Image (spheres, coloured by chain):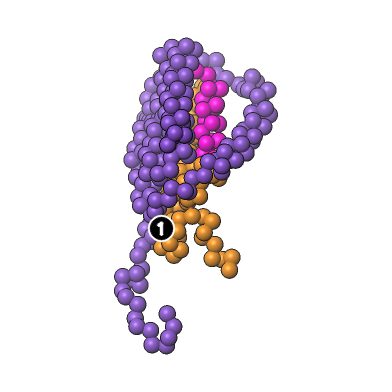
Chain colours: A purple, B orange
Amino acid sequence: MNLNRVFYGALGLAGAVAMGAGLQSAGGPGLAFGFCAYLILGGAAVCIWERSIVRSAFSLMATFLGVAGLFVLLGSDFLAMAQILIYVGGILALLLFGVMLSPPDNEERSLARVGAATVLVGAGVAFVAAQVAGGVAGWVMADTLPAEDSHARAIGLAFLDPKQYVVAFELAAYLLTVALVAAVYIARRRRVDYEPLPASAGGQD
Amino acid sequence: MGLGAYVGVSAALFALGLICIISRRNILYVLFGVEMVMNAAMINFAAFNHFNGGGLEGRVFVVFLIILAAAESAIALAIVLNVFHLMKTVKPSEADFLRE
């Protein structure tokens, strides 16, 4: 319990620091960025930390909402809307449905394993960051950032334009249909599940 | 906020997702981690798109990623349901009857 308090205290402090640093460096948009980044990373950290899988699943909601906020900051309002509708409304609901399968198990999270994984992944991230760090300065950036306006219409037209994405769009629709039908097929209850097993005559069960 | 800040957040989210995948002993946490990793990829697509002039390519990729994530999580959940039905467990380390 004590460790829990330390974790959540550190989390709150990190949020204040993130928003303060954003406000300091870029004013209002920086504050919004800091808040979204805090939602994303804080939600993910709580998901890893929490023992209760229901709390973990709901903390993922903060992550998804934060990503939607970053999309708004990047001028992609259509993506933010799709993110909230599909991720928060659909995928998270599916995952919560799966939570019902999981019996409560307070010993499942082991801090030793989380620590070992953190060290391992941290080493990998540090290695990649060291490789990339020199190249970041050479990234090609646009001279002027695009104006903030809605791209929903342009995206819709691009999806239906034979010269652009219509094939990929139809394939995606097909994939989604097949995936959902297949999911229903895989997860269905068979008749055997409902009927009691016939009394075994041959001594086999 | 420049491109570096967005890429940094995305890298951190990717790392947290990876930690979630390898440290928790429950198939559902593995799925949570995969969702985090996909969200990190989506932030990258949107950010690079925005800071390179704001065409449609990155955005369209993100839309396809969202579709892919929806299909993936539906199928994964169906498989988890079946695994639970067959083996009465959702721990990846216990679903090992092929070993015997």
**Quadrant including the C terminus of chain A:** bottom left
Is residue A68 shown above or below A165? above
Residue found 40% across the figure and 45% down from its top: A53
Q: Is residue A171 visible?
A: no
Is residue B74 shown above or below A58? below
Per the image, the residue denoted by label 1 is B81
Q: Is residue A107 visible?
A: yes
Residue found 36% across the figure and 62% down from its top: A188
Residue A85, image x and y in percent?
34, 37
Is residue A146 shown above or below A174? above
Dot 1 amino acid type: Leu
Magenta span: B1-19
Residue B41, image x and y in percent?
52, 35
Q: Is residue A97 left or right of residue B11?
A: left
Residue found 39% across the figure and 47% down from its top: A95
In magenta stretch: residue B7: yes
Q: Nearer the viewer, residue A108 or A16?
A: A108
Residue found 37% across the figure and 25% down from its top: A150
Residue B35, image x and y in percent?
46, 41
SS for callout 1: helix
Please count the marks in the image.
Answer: 1
- Snapshot quadrant of residue A194: bottom left
* Chain that bears disc 1: B
Q: Nearer the viewer, residue A10 or B61?
A: A10
| Magenta-drawn stretch, dominant element (helix, strand or loop) | helix
